[in-house]
Amino acid sequence: MTGFGTDHLPYGVFSVDGGPRRVGVRLDDGVLDLAALTDRPELAAPSLNPLMALGPQVWRETREHVAYLVDAGSPTVPVADVVLHLPFEVADYVDFYASEHHATNVGRIMRPDGEALTPNWKHLPIGYHGRAGTVVASGTPVVRPTGQRHADDVGPSRRLDLEAELGFVVGTPSPLGSPVPVSDLADHVFGVVGLNDWSARDLQAWEYVPLGPFLAKSFATTISHWVTPLAALDAAWCDLPAQDPRPADYLGPDVARGLDVDVEVELAGEVVARPPYSSHYWGPAQMLAHLTVNGASLRTGDLFASGTISGPGAHQRGSLLELSWGGREPFVVAGRERTFLEDGDEVVLRYSAPSTSGGRLTLGEVRGTIHPAR
Ligand code: MN
């Protein structure tokens, strides 16, 4: 059981021996070379964007075609023999803040004397625009960012953190001026990636007033090599916790649906948290509807992310900020007390979800090692 069986078939971009980048599909420990097995130009492209731009009918036909190629016993290239690349060209990148447990924890840590949630929190999925050009593929080293930690205090971040998230990848664009309703998620979203929104908490705390995250997050965001098609997650949809107060009509009251994806956060070789995405407050269709309610258009390659995934339990927190309660309560990893990320730390995010065959899918993992500041 690899989690990459015929019920999954995620897409990626790979090359062999320095050859051209092309579209591949992961099957167990191999990669189906779609450029070699078909004569479709969008599958010989160096990114998934041309395929993603063709829309849901072509995505369905392609998935059927891939299933046929698998049934026919088409050869695969061992995944150990390929180089995997960033799977798509990121157009715009938006990150939400849609876990109530995460937002409540952060509120308590950062504003212990105030309300944990801001007055707007249960009325709209809060988000910010991130930096598309610094979204990198799993395995890319992350250089510790330098910046303003406080007034007259410039230096390498001392509170570098991870954020375990899921990313949603837009294929079909939408015209400027036309909001995308909650019912249309599957018409626009091609698939799902694992995502680590690396965050420098000291830079963030100093810079974020009043316009939100900026350099504390724009230095790197890591995504998985594999994009799981939305169709592979048909069995993973679940009801999210009840939303109270009732959201505005465009956020589709009574259709708050999410995905039952289990996340695992590994730090220095040890699992330190298991956040459940099923405990999120706002679902992906609601995030997409909110992102476009003002008429903002979608482009092929847009990426929007869930925000840190944290559940109600102490071991379900998807950031070190929460696991160490703002750095005040160190926790033990591999026999040592830890708070934030140290140089040389490797972080691995793993994801699994129920599949249509009754088993479980393993989504693409997200890996990154911290390199010292330059
Ligand atoms: Mn985030």
Image (spheres, helix red, strand yellow):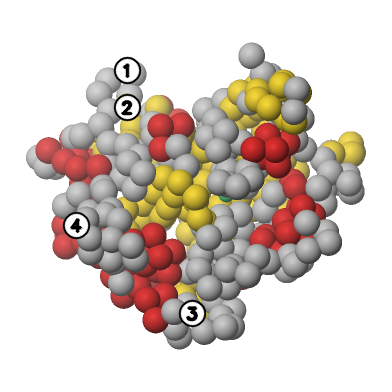
Inter-mark Cα distance, 1 to 3: 51 Å
Residue 161 image position (x, y, % from top left): 69, 40
Q: Which mark is residue 247?
A: 3
Q: Which residue is under mark 2? A: 15
**As shown in the figure, which amino acid type bears the numbered disc 1?**
Gly
Q: Nearer the viewer, mark 1 or mark 3?
A: 3
Q: Nearer the viewer, mark 2 or mark 4?
A: 4
Residue 13 image position (x, y, % from top left): 32, 36
Q: Nearer the viewer, residue 370 or 31?
A: 370
Q: Secondary structure at mark 1?
A: loop
Q: Secondary structure at mark 4?
A: loop
Q: Is disc 1 surrounded by few (<14), some (14 to 19) or many (20+) residues within 10 Å?
A: few
**As shown in the figure, which amino acid type bears the numbered disc 4?**
Pro
- From this viewpoint, is residue 71 visible? no
Inter-mark Cα distance, 1 to 4: 38 Å
State yes or no: discs 2 and 1 in contact (Cβ < 8 Å): yes
Q: Nearer the viewer, residue 292 or 41?
A: 292
